[in-house]
Image (tube, rainbow, N blue to C red):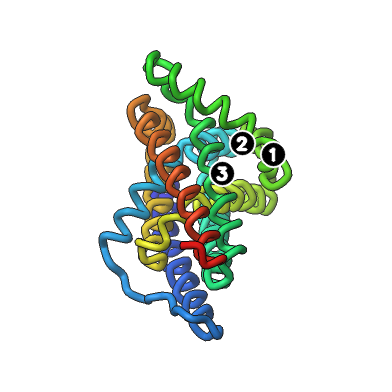
């Protein structure tokens, strides 16, 4: 009983701490001399959008966590994995929001950020292909499209995105503090990559509520993994869910590229 209750209780405590940290960072951002303030209003639509999108992008994270839990059994190790992964994901999220808040008034820097975010989304879409191979026709079509796209984006992204393929194997048996640090590092990178991909949405979605949805969804995923790692991983690897997520990645990436062009044209007063 203790092995379940203590980690589950801590997920709620960590969620509260991270939400308070997010709020404090947003208040700090609002003290900066910027043209627009972050709206500190929790709209449930924004929270729902953030949570839904995050859960659709959490396949790699769930697999990583499942393997890490298998290699490091015991409730104390679960606590290290829980705290580390939650803080890593949240800090990555806050950093991206901070960059967006700081640079959105500097049009060319914002355009560069949105452009890179769009390329990241294409990369995430390509990484999702393996999860719906059973859906032969859509898999074949999207693989051809994304393979061509990847050849174009790789020369840029290879210099920006770290290689986390080795770390994502998750098969490490570590001491408690080492496990805490390792659990934080990979979700931090995933948080940066995944959340950066949604920069194009920030013009229509309140980032504060969106970020709370992301942190909340991460908490729910943590709870589900602790209760039943195998079933949770099987659920997030569902072929149809993966297909929908991949299409969402592609759609947002295209939207981001369009926004990039618009921002550049507006910066040079051509629009």
151 versus 19 height, above or below:
above
Q: Position of residue 150 (x, y in %)?
A: 60, 31
> Any mark on residue 120, and which?
3
Q: Position of residue 83 (x, y in %)?
A: 53, 56
Q: CA distance from mark 2 to mark 1?
A: 10 Å
Q: CA distance from mark 2 to mark 3?
A: 17 Å
**Nearest to N terminus: mark 1 or mark 3:** 3
124 versus 215 height, above or below:
above
Mark 1, Cα crowd under 10 Å, few <14 / some 14-19 / many 20+, is: few
The furthest residue to the left: 44
From the viewer's side, name the closer residue of 100 and 239. Answer: 100
Q: Secondary structure at mark 1?
A: loop
| Whether label 2 touches label 3, CB < 8 Å | no
Residue topped by disc 1: 163
From the viewer's side, name the closer residue of 142 and 175. Answer: 142
Residue topped by disc 2: 168
At 44% from the left and 47% from the top, the residue drawn is: 3
At 55% from the left and 83% from the top, the residue drawn is: 32
Q: Secondary structure at mark 3?
A: helix
9 versus 158 height, above or below:
below
Mark 3, Cα crowd under 10 Å, few <14 / some 14-19 / many 20+, is: many
**Nearest to N terminus: mark 2 or mark 1:** 1
Mark 2, Cα crowd under 10 Å, few <14 / some 14-19 / many 20+, is: some
The furthest residue to the front: 270
């Amino acid at each position: 009983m203790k092995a379940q209750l203590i980690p589950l209780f801590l997920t709620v405590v960590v969620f509260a701490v991270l939400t308070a940290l997010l709020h404090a960072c947003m208040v700090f951002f609002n003290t900066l001399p910027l043209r627009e303030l972050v709206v500190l209003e929790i709209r449930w639509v924004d929270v729902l959008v953030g949570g839904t999108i995050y859960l659709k992008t959490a396949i790699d994270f769930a697999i990583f966590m499942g393997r890490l839990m298998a290699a490091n059994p015991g409730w104390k190790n679960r606590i290290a994995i829980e705290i580390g992964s939650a803080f890593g994901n949240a800090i990555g999220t806050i950093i991206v929001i901070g960059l967006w808040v700081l640079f959105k008034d500097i049009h060319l820097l914002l355009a560069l950020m949105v452009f890179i975010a769009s390329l990241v989304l294409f990369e995430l879409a390509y990484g999702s292909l393996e999860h719906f191979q059973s859906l032969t026709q859509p898999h074949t079509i999207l693989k051809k499209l994304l393979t061509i796209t990847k050849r174009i984006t790789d020369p840029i992204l290879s210099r920006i995105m770290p290689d986390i393929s080795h770390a994502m194997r998750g098969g490490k048996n570590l001491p408690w503090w080492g496990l805490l640090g390792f659990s934080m590092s990979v979700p931090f990178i995933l948080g940066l990559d995944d959340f950066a991909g949604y920069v194009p949405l920030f013009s229509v979605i309140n980032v504060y509520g969106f970020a709370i949805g992301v942190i909340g969804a991460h908490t729910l995923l943590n709870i589900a993994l602790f209760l039943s790692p195998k079933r949770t991983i099987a659920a997030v690897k569902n072929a149809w869910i993966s297909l929908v997520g991949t299409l969402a990645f592609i759609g947002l990436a295209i939207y981001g590229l369009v926004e990039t062009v618009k921002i550049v044209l507006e910066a040079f007063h051509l629009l």
